[in-house]
Amino acid sequence: MRQIVLDTETTGLSAENGDRIIEIGCVELLNRKLTGNNLHHYINPERDSHEDALKVHGLTTEFLSSKPKFAAIADELLAYLDGAELIIHNAPFDIGFLNKELELLGKPPIMACISGVIDSLVLAKEMFPGKRNGLDALCDRLGVDNSNRTLHGALLDAELLADVYINMTRGQDALLIDTSDSGADGSSLELIDLRQFDLPVLRANELECAAHEALLADLDKASKGKTVWRTRVAAA
């Protein structure tokens, strides 16, 4: 499965009101592993950035004036994204800007060349209801090193988001995290089928159950009653 983690920087917040993309960063995942086949472009937007946006990304009009326009990199970008699933944090924002840039060139919207989009912000809100779920907050929560992120940059943010996404969606279906055929010393590893064991069931005591209910109540309050488990219990 080929996935592309994508991020953009823009001159402002509204593509419909004339704001443009000034930077695109893409990081490739193949079967959930980083390949190093990344794509990165600074883009001349042919306009100034809003003051607040400039404080976020630090990319000046002078710096961008010598960079290619979106039209010059569009075909390369579309070929790179072709058939991939995109992973984007707050996807409607970036997709909206990409579609506007493509529309200005008379090209179909981005969904015409990709297989789908995963919004990592939606995933984060489902996993951590009531919490801050910006990229910096997720890096702190999931142990991803973001110490080099002093300003927003599309490629750096895409690299960080790739690590965040892998951490958010990591599953474990065996006691051995590394399921390769050999150990660190070269010896072969024996995979054990746990179904052969009669594993004991350790049930929570009254204090543990009370603590669990208190935590659920806090999450219910923080999410204003939108927690999934309460909805399912009510439906049942």
Image: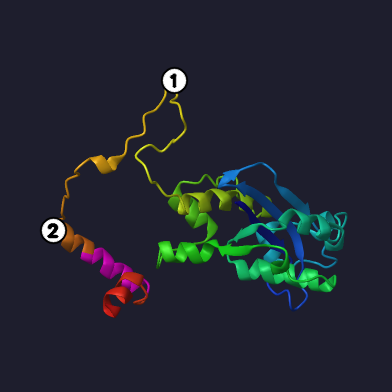
Tell me the quadrant of the picture where the C terminus can be found.
bottom left
Q: Secondary structure at mark 1?
A: loop
Question: Residue 12, how many percent across, how many down?
Answer: 71, 69
Say which amino acid is labelled 1. Asp
Residue 207 shows which numbered tag?
2
Residue 185 shows which numbered tag?
1
Q: Which residues are magenta?
A: 213-223
- Measured in 3D between alpha carbons, the distance from the residue under mark 1 to the one under mark 2, in whole angstroms, is 44 Å
Q: Residue at x 15, y 54 (%)?
A: 203
Q: Is residue 12 visible?
A: no
Q: Residues within 10 Å of mark 2 (few under 14, many from 20)?
A: few
Say which amino acid is labelled 2. Leu
Horizontally, residue 180 falls left or right of residue 195, namely right
What kind of secondary structure does the magenta stretch mostly adopt?
helix
Tell which circle, 1 or 2, labels the residue nearer the N-terminal end.
Answer: 1
Q: Is residue 217 magenta?
A: yes
Along the viewing direction, whichever of 169 and 125 lies nearer the viewer: 169
When asked about the image quadrant of residue 92, the answer is: bottom right
Q: As displayed, is residue 139 above or below residue 35? A: below
